[in-house]
Amino acid sequence: MLARQQKELDEARKEAVAMVQRAKRRVQETEQLLDREQTEGKGVHTEMLGTLRQKEITQ
């Protein structure tokens, strides 16, 4: 029973780590897009937000 609980805990920990990694990656992508928007103009923001949303749907 304890081994099963440990296995469940390990699995939950792995899922949490993966979620944090995805969130960090999204933050990094968003920061890059904002930097790009500032240098290239406003049209990029709308275009890339659609791309980010599509990535979230597929993940």
Image (cartoon, rainbow, N blue to C red):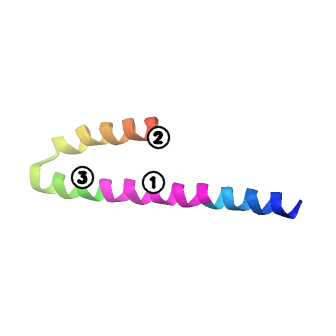
Mark 3 or 1: in front is 1
The residue wearing badge 1 is: 22
- Determine whether label 2 and label 1 are within 8 Å by CB: yes
* Amino acid type, mark 2: Gln
Q: Measured from the top left, where is residue 41 in percent x and y?
A: 12, 48
The residues colored magenta run: 14-29
The residue wearing badge 3 is: 33
Q: Residue at x 64, y 61 (%)?
A: 13
Vertical placement of 3 versus 53: above or below?
Answer: below
Sequence-wise, the earlier of marks 2 and 1 is 1
Mark 2 or 3: in front is 2
Q: Magenta region, mostly helix, strand or loop?
A: helix
Disc 3 element: helix
Disc 1 element: helix
Front position in the image: 43 or 24 = 24
Disc 2 element: loop
